[in-house]
Amino acid sequence: MESYYLGLILLLSLLAVGDLIVGVSNDAVNFLNSAIGSKAISFRNLMILASIGILCGAVFSSGMMEVARKGIFNPSAFYFNEIISIFLAVMMTDILLLDFFNSFGMPTSTTVSIVFELLGAAVIMSIIKIVDAGNDLSTLGSYINTEKAAQIILGILLSVVIAFSIGALVQWLARMLWTYKFEQKSPLWSALFGGVSLTAITTFILIKGIKGTPFANTSFDLLGGQTILSFLEGETLVVNGSLFIFWFVFSWLIQGVLKIDIYKVIIGIGTFALALAFAGNDLVNFIGVPIAAFQSYEAWVSSGMHPDFYEMSALAKKVPTPSSFLLLSGAIMIATLWTSSKARAVVKTSIDLSNQQNTRERFKANFVARQLVNSARFFNRAFVGITPKSVLQKIDKTYASGSEATVIDPDAPAFDKLRASINLVVAAVLISFATSLKLPLSTTYVTFMVAMGSSLADRAWGADSAVYRVAGVINVIGGWFFTAFSAFTLGGIVVFAIHKGGIWSIGTILFVIVFLLLKNYQIHRNRKRKNVAYERILRLKNQNTTDVIRDSGHSIAAVMQTVMTTYGLMVRGLTNYDLAPLWSAKRESRKLNRELEELRNGVFYFIRSIDTQETKAATFYVNQLGALQDVNEDLYYLTKLTHLHVYNSHQKLSGEHVENLLDLEESLQRLLQEAKEAFAAGTDDSEYQDVFALRADIYKLLEEKIQWQIEQTAQFESSPRNASLYFNILLKTKDLVRNQFELIDTFYSSVQER
């Protein structure tokens, strides 16, 4: 029996490592987005600062571990075997949820996931116990710490509104006072900003750091016999006043004497502070449950009792977390931070939504976003109507040089250092306040919503981008609610399965976890490759027409491969009367259409990114997109037509129809293959001659097939639907071939002109 539970503890340890990896990938956005977006600090130095902050925060996080042990449920109401089932269900669910969001680059809350997983698993286990005992469900309150759970949940939800509102207000005030020309302000103004910002960040570090150390309750004569903790809490005005004076003088000196940019200092220290907060506040989300399970195991082994009858009242006591566990966890988090591509994908989502420049919008507009934007415009018109013109002119003058920049430079900062500093300072203040109340506030919610609020106040959401940015924020927030619901539901389902099925259920769930992790990894990898290819097309900065032709040729060659594959699936599905290939063909055509639509939407950024003297490159690119769209429209029509024929269970094609169709496909595949090789070769003239040599043959073959069908229809054809289908296939294939050669002719002409 003891070896069985020891095995479960070891399994929980492995799950903790996995949870740390997926958790850091998600929460890197909390402390990296402001510094990366402003590009004030090199990426290497930024990662070093964040790593030091994570290590310090991990050491100081012991106090927050209480949440996992007794923050959600009453441990004395459960036996050891039930507690282990709850903890195992929570960790399994957490890895799946966080990895799912990471794979799609969406930041979610690890705090929300762990709280609702604990709540869902504990509630279901409580219901099982109540039903088995024949009691009424009204006794559920004796199992669940409803007051603390409600306090945690309310704190998390309020953080969304508060963080957004305060972030917007502080950013607006800062922009009014310092404007977009803040670096040209008097050193006194910069020193004032540095004093306020660094005081807030330092107070935050003290609250997050000192309270978690063993010497927090040690008294010092220098403090009049008070402990550090009591001094910080009782002498807030003295502490903050002294810190402000120190940092004000410090900011003035390093600017005037050392010529160091104070805003870079604020961003660097703020990144360190938020990394510390992340590890200190959120480490409980990753290892709090496994550590609580380990301590439960130790208590049970010492008791010598049967696991089904040992009450876990030991978890209600305050038990320090071994420092070795914290240091090891910090090391894993740091290693993940440096190596995780998913972490960068999550950070990119936040930066894109707060970008000051015109940029490719990732999210599509939706009904809610449109209504919110229209409502905001209504209130804005009302505000303009009652505000004196002189005030409006002053506000517009402040924003004139910075709102929604039109310079397209992929290497330019997403926003300036003033906004990055505001994001860090406001987030630090809000998180430190919540931590002082021992609330596991979601650092993801706070940092993300502060960044969104400051973006709104900074007019980063302009007329051309607002509806898409708002839609993005709605999607992210919707994902947070989905996290809560899924965490509660899955946590309950998994703990029920473990309780009823034991080791067999655990093995099955582990298999599902591994399968889904591999699947999500494949999805993320494919999406990353697609984004890299897309960015390569749009980042043709200062290249000439020859370069554009070469790079576009590779992209068109990839499209030709998709056309070949899709047409082949369509023919196979139709001739074999098999719906599966037809579904695949239709899906591939739709996917190609979405990719082409993204490229069309990116034409503006493409034109702005190339050499201003190379107008031919822009003309060539636009024409190629139009021709590709024509090819795909023909392809989509064919896939939809054939899919509908089989889907509606119409009559199969005759043997002669099948032979003719296969003959046509063979010729078309040969043409597409030659075209693909020509586009991939770029400027090799001989490759295009091979394509042109097939032009007469393919047209002749199509005419022969059309004539054959006319004669067949006049004399023998008995199925009007089959005749109509076959005619449509031939005619639309002819259009596809014609558009294909139009694409080749245009491309070849451009090659010849070079």
Image: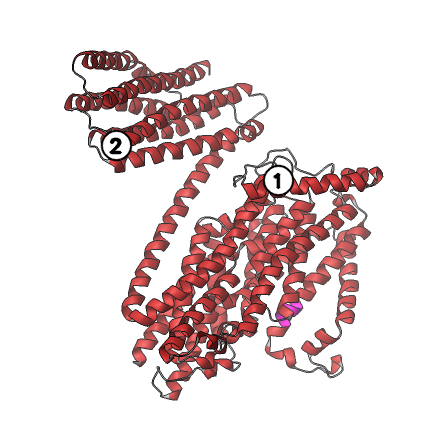
Position of 399 compared to 482: left or right?
Answer: right
Query: Mark 1–mark 2 contact, CB under 8 Å?
Result: no
Tell me if mark 2 has few (under 14), some (14-19) or many (20+) residues whose alpha carbon lies within 10 angstroms of its own. Answer: some
Residue range in magenta is 205-210
The residue labelled by disc 2 is 646
Position of 266 compared to 30: left or right?
Answer: right
Question: Which amino acid type corresponds to the residue marked 1 in the rendered image?
Answer: Ala
Nearer the observer, 656 or 33: 656
Considering the image in quadrants, where does the N terminus appear?
bottom left
Q: Would residue 18 be seen by someone viewing this image from the given angle?
A: no
Q: Would residue 116 be seen by someone viewing this image from the given angle?
A: yes
Q: Label 2's element? A: helix
Residue 647 inside the magenta-drawn segment? no
**Residue 293 to residue 384: above or below:** below
Position of 472 compared to 336: left or right?
Answer: right
Q: Label 1's element? A: helix
Position of 467 compared to 237: left or right?
Answer: left
Question: Which amino acid type corresponds to the residue marked 2 in the rendered image?
Answer: Val
Q: Position of residue 44 (x, y in %)?
A: 55, 52
The residue labelled by disc 1 is 466
Residue 209 inside the magenta-drawn segment? yes
Q: Position of residue 350 (x, y in %)?
A: 56, 48
Image quarter for residue 206? bottom right
Look at 51% across and 72% down and name the residue there: 72
